Image (cartoon, helix red, strand yellow):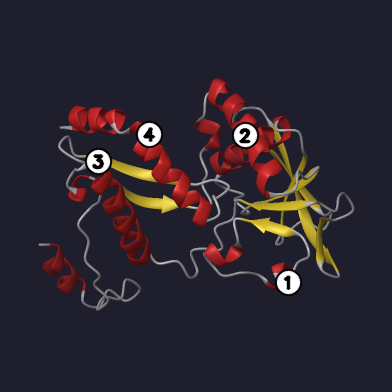
């Protein structure tokens, strides 16, 4: 079945490209995203999307080179061709593989032609930075970020033209990021503190249904069947049985 889907998409390539072009004209293109995909053999569907992706350290050198070219074009098209970037990260002192991701993303950005410093707002070190030696042998310095009026800077180092976040804001947006003069992408308002997967599935289903109509295929081949169940509290375990019953 998947080979048939692939062939149908190939046969409709001009229509598919035109559809994507029309979608991007109406909505800003995200700087980056990652998608979890499940392949059932008879259908294939995205089951999650992340607007603040990690895992760039898993990309091979060839893909990183391509990513740098695409990044350069994106920054020129959407961000006014900035010269300096502050890469806003999470503070993962134990998850060194996340920091390997930061090093890889920083390298992609630098190879696109911008200078980059990585930092966050909650460093425990009074020096204003903290250094990490990673499993790969690479070194990463995270800077404490500061605020001067309505601009962010890596303390004592750089006032960036653009801020790129690799922090998903699951705990909310810190006040230090309020009302900045600099652009920050993706917007902190898209963080997990207020995004719902149920909303994601609603809009995703709507989009792939449009695409399936172009391909003359059943849209069920591209989306998972989901239900919204709100009567459960994962913190207390209340009504887990009800959730299990809904799944059954």
User: Between disc 2 and disc 1, whose residue precedes?
Assistant: 2
Where residue 103 sits: x, y (%)? Answer: 65, 36
Q: On residue 14, which mark appears?
A: 4
Q: Callout 4: 10 Å neighbours few (<14), some, many (20+)?
A: few
Q: Which residue is mark 2?
A: 104
Q: Residue at x 54, y 39 (%)?
A: 97
Mark 3 element type: helix
Give the mark nearer the N terminus: 4 vs 1: 4
Mark 3 highlights which residue? 215
**Residue 38 horizontal/vertical position (percent):** 27, 42
Q: Residues within 10 Å of mark 1 (few under 14, many from 20)?
A: few
Residue at 52%, 29% (x, y): give it. 59
Nearer the viewer's eye, disc 4 or disc 1?
4
Q: Nearer the viewer, mark 4 or mark 3?
A: 4
Quadrant hosting residue 182: bottom right
Q: Residues within 10 Å of mark 3 (few under 14, many from 20)?
A: some
Residue drawn at 45 percent across, 49 percent down: 22
Separation (CA) of disc 1 from disc 3: 44 Å
Q: Is residue 177 above or below residue 82?
A: below
Which of the marked residues, 1 or 3, is nearer the chain's N terminus?
A: 1
Q: Name the residue carrying label 1.
A: 179
Query: In the image, which is nearer the foreground, mark 2 or mark 3?
Result: 3
Residue in the foreground of this view, choosing between 32 and 173 = 32
> Mark 4 touching mark 1, by CB under 8 A?
no
Label located before the other in sequence (2 or 3): 2
Q: Is residue 125 left or right of residue 94?
A: right
Q: Secondary structure at mark 2?
A: helix
């Amino acid at each position: 079945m998947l080979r048939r889907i692939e062939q149908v998409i190939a046969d409709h390539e001009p229509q598919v490209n035109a559809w994507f072009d029309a979608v991007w004209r109406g909505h800003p293109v995200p700087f980056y995203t990652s998608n979890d995909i499940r392949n059932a053999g008879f259908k294939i569907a995205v089951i999650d999307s992340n607007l603040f992706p990690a895992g760039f350290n898993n990309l091979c050198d060839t893909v990183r080179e391509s990513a740098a070219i695409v990044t350069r074009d994106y920054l020129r098209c959407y961000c006014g061709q900035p010269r300096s970037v502050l890469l806003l990260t999470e503070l993962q002192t134990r998850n060194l593989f996340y920091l390997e991701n930061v090093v890889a993303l920083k390298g992609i950005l630098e190879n696109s032609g911008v200078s980059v410093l990585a930092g966050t707002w909650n460093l425990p070190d009074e020096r204003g930075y903290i250094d990490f030696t990673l499993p790969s042998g690479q070194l990463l310095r995270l800077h404490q970020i500061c605020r001067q009026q309505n601009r962010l800077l890596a303390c004592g180092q750089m006032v960036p033209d653009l801020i790129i976040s690799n922090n998903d804001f699951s705990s909310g947006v810190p006040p230090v990021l309020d009302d900045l003069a600099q652009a920050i992408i993706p917007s902190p308002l898209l963080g997990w503190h207020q995004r719902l997967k149920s909303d994601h599935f609603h809009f995703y289903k709507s989009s792939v249904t449009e695409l399936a109509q172009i391909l003359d295929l059943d849209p069920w081949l591209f989306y998972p069947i989901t239900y919204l169940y709100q009567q459960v509290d994962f913190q207390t375990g209340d009504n887990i049985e009800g959730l299990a019953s809904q799944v059954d």
